[in-house]
Each structure stands twice: as structure tokens, then as C-alpha cells.
Image (cartoon, helix red, strand yellow):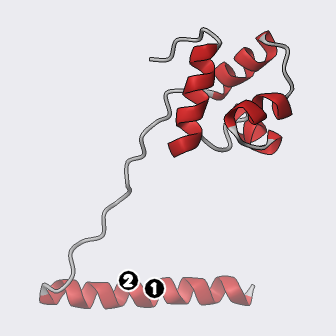
Amino acid sequence: MQGIVNIAAAREARDERDDVQRARGAVRARPVERLRKRSPVSGMLIRRTRLDREMTQAEFGALIGVSDATVSSWELGQKRPTGLQLRELLRVLSDCGVKVA
């Protein structure tokens, strides 16, 4: 519980400091939230493609170069493929005949 109190106190102190600096013109307002780009591939599409090919998550992951846990997290929507993983996933889906917008 003490850790939560310390985090809240630190955030409050930071906000107060930022307010003072902002009033002096030294700090710009913090952005509300960064917009995240959505992945063109859904977890449902990954799962459907994998099951249509009668592959396990480990087999499908080996084609992409990721673990079965990673494939599972994509399928469940807990994580999204990015960077090189996304490029390899799109290559595998294309090889399977799946069109991705």
C-alpha cells in the first residue's frame, strides 16, 4: 500500500512542478494520449488462418519466428504484432492465400 501512496505523491508533485513551469512558459502541456496505429491483422484472422491450415500455435509461430505464447497473445488480443514480427506474419498470411487490407 505504501508503494501506491508513494506513486500517487510523486505524480502529484510532478503535476505541481509542471503547473509552475507551465505558468512560467517553460513547459508545454503534456499530450493527452498518443494515438496508436491499429494492426491490419486481427487475432481472429490469425487464429482462423492457423486452424484452417491445421497448425498448432508453436508450428505457426515457427514460421514467423516467434513463440507459441506470442501467437496465443495475438489471437487473444492481448498484444499486437509489430515491426519485423508484423512483416513476417503478413508474409506467412500472404503465402497462405489470405488477403489483408
Q: Nearer the viewer, residue 25 or 78?
A: 78
The amino acid at mark 2 is Asp
Vertical position of residue 22 compared to residue 69: above or below? below
Specify the amino acid type for callout 1: Glu
Q: Residue at x 71, y 16 (%)?
A: 49
Residue 75 falls in which quadrant of the image?
A: top right
Q: Quadrant of residue 72?
A: top right
Q: Quadrant of the C terminus?
A: top left
Q: Is residue 82 visible?
A: no
- Circle 1 packing at 10 Å, graded few (<14), some (14-19), many (20+), is few
Where does the image place residue 63, in percent across and percent down from the top left?
A: 72, 30
Secondary element under disc 2, as helix, strand or loop, is: helix
**Left or right of 71: which side holds 5?**
left
- Give the labeled residue for mark 2: 15
| Residue at the extreme left of the image, as rendered | 25
In the picture, which quadrant includes the N terminus?
bottom right
At horizontal 50% and vertical 17% (from top left) the residue drawn is 100
User: How busy is the neighbourhood of tag 2: few (under 14 within 10 Å), some, or many (20 plus)?
Assistant: few
Report helix, strand or loop for mark 1.
helix
- Residue found at x 49% / y 27%: 40
Quadrant hosting residue 66: top right
Mark linked to residue 49: none
Q: Which residue is mark 1?
A: 12
Q: Residue at x 79, y 12 (%)?
A: 53
- Residue 23, placed above or below residue 76: below
How many discs appear?
A: 2
Distance from disc 1 to disc 2, alpha carbons, whole Å, reads: 5 Å
Horizontally, is 80 left or right of 28 in the view? Answer: right
* Label 1–label 2 contact, CB within 8 A: yes
Q: Is residue 21 above or below residue 51?
A: below
> Where 52 sits versus 78, above or below?
above
Q: Position of residue 36 (x, y in %)?
A: 42, 46
